[in-house]
């Protein structure tokens, strides 16, 4: 009886081995491990797995369907040509870089040419190089992208220009951030200063809108010492993967304590993205603009308002210097008439430190320089350089 039990147990172990081996083969094919060579007739699962790791079958029992069915409805998977397999969420594709959010690895940017396969149950909107816009679920295989809605559309992988998650009419194309900071002191000097920074952006397959509002208010011993407001808006239209046209570049500014009742800078230009490798982004733009300034204080030597044509150059740089720390640099140089300020420079350097998924700590350095500044509200000459360092907590959403 004991011998029969041992034989039965041993026989059960032999029967159970193929199921574990099949799972190892399926996953091994995705992580580039060597599949065992069968010594007997291949099982039905092994038959559906091609020896060539660059080929995926679409039969009912294929590894693509098995892995896709094991994911949640809000998860995407990406298989690289190097054999690496990623699970997470596809965000967008711009400039031949796929933005991918992985729970373990964080935000990634993957070269489009390095991707072998994609499977997703999400809706995406894509733009092809010939201008077609299609919305549907996507699957990439053997260099062909299949977009499915009420029918199937097939395009070559190299002909895909832009991809965004969701339809272009939804809230998914909007991103925003609100940051607040304050400085309070009492005693010999009673001082209150607070700053606000609000940013919104809208990114579609063919265009991009960025807006921001910054306000700094300060009061010392019940006397107002700071009041500045700045609103920025840019609207970009993509004409190529790296080249864009900027029909609107708007800058509204008010600082009555520095004798600026209102200032309007409206321009246009062209831009080019020089770097976008996942860790850093660099783009520049150049174009003409129109500058109008209305002064808070006027005298015999200063007109009530002035207007002039100008030439503007802008630079935007972003870099991930740590998993939780991002650096953003924005610089703008404007050349106008000498008696209206001459060269004007506006620099913003921001460090964004991620505390939680939605809460950030921000350190911002602002530098404004005007070569020939107008007198202030009291008629006294202003300094050419104006520096400011602010701290605040921000909430991000997308």
Image: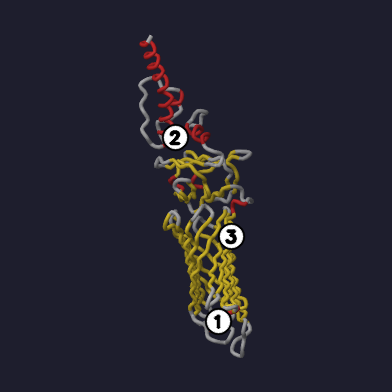
Q: Which mark is residue 340?
A: 1
Q: In the depicted view, which residue is nearer to us: 279 or 197?
A: 197
Q: According to the image, label 3 marks what residue? A: 200
Mark 2 vs 1, N-terminal side: 2
| Left or right: 238 in relation to 25 | right
| Quadrant of the image containing the N terminus | top left
Q: In the depicted view, which residue is nearer to us: 157 or 49?
A: 49
Secondary structure under tag 3 reads strand
Q: From this viewpoint, is residue 234 visible?
A: no
Figure quadrant of residue 260: bottom right
Secondary structure under tag 1 reads helix
The 10 Å Cα crowd at callout 2, few under 14, some 14 to 19, many 20 or more, is: few
Q: In the depicted view, which residue is nearer to us: 378 or 78?
A: 378
Looking at the picture, how far across and down is residue 334, in whole percent? 51, 74
Viewer-nearest of labels 2 and 3?
3
Viewer-nearest of labels 1 and 3?
3
The Cα–Cα distance between marks 2 and 3, rounded to whole angstroms, is 42 Å
Q: Which mark is residue 57?
A: none
Q: Residue at x 61, y 89 (%)?
A: 299
Mark 2 vs 3, N-terminal side: 2
Figure quadrant of residue 376: bottom right
| Left or right: 295 in relation to 160 | right
Q: Residue at x 57, y 54 (%)?
A: 397
Q: In the depicted view, which residue is nearer to us: 142 or 15?
A: 15
Secondary structure under tag 2 reads loop
Q: Is residue 250 above or below residue 103?
A: below
Asked whether disc 1 touches disc 3, contact meaning CB atoms under 8 Å apart, the reply is: no
The 10 Å Cα crowd at callout 3, few under 14, some 14 to 19, many 20 or more, is: some
Q: Residue at x 44, y 40 (%)?
A: 85
Q: According to the image, label 2 marks what residue? A: 55
Mark 1 vs 3, N-terminal side: 3
For the rendered model, the colour scheme is: secondary structure
């Amino acid at each position: 009886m004991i011998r029969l039990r041992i034989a039965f147990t041993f026989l059960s172990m032999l029967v159970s081995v193929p199921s574990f081996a099949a799972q190892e083969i399926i996953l091994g094919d995705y992580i580039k491990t060597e599949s065992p060579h069968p010594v007997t007739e291949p099982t039905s699962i092994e038959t559906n797995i091609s020896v060539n790791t660059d080929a995926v079958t679409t039969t009912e029992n294929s590894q693509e369907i098995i892995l896709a069915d094991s994911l949640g409805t809000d998860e995407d998977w990406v298989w690289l040509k190097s054999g690496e397999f990623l699970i997470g969420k596809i965000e967008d594709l711009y400039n031949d870089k796929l933005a991918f959010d992985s729970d373990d690895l964080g935000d990634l940017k993957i070269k489009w040419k390095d991707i072998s396969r994609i499977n997703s149950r999400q809706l995406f909107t894509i733009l092809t190089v010939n201008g077609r816009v299609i919305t549907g679920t996507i699957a990439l295989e053997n260099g062909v992208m299949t977009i499915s809605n009420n029918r199937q559309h097939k395009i070559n992988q190299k002909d895909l220009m832009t991809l965004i998650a969701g339809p272009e009419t939804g809230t998914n194309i909007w991103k925003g951030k609100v940051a607040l900071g304050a400085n309070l002191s009492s005693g010999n000097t009673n001082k209150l200063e607070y700053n606000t920074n609000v940013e919104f952006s809208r990114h579609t397959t063919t265009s991009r809108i960025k807006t921001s509002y910054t306000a700094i208010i300060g009061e010392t011993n019940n006397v107002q010492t700071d009041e500045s407001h700045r609103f920025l808006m840019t609207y970009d239209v993509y004409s190529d993967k790296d080249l864009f046209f900027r029909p609107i570049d708007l800058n509204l500014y008010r600082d009555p304590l520095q004798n600026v009742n209102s200032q309007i800078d409206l321009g246009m230009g062209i831009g080019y993205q020089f770097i976008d490798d996942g860790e850093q982004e660099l783009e520049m733009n150049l174009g003409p603009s129109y500058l109008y300034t209305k002064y808070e204080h006027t005298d015999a030597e200063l007109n009530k308002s002035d207007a002039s044509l100008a030439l503007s150059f802008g630079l935007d740089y972003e870099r991930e210097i740590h998993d939780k720390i991002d650096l953003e640099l924005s610089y703008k140089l404007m050349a106008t008439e000498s008696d209206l300020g001459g060269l004007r420079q506006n620099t913003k350097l921001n460090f964004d430190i991620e505390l939680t998924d939605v809460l950030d700590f921000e350190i911002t350095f602002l530098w404004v320089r005007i070569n020939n500044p107008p007198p202030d509200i009291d008629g006294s000459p202003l300094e050419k350089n104006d520096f400011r360092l602010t701290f605040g907590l921000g909430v991000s959403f997308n």
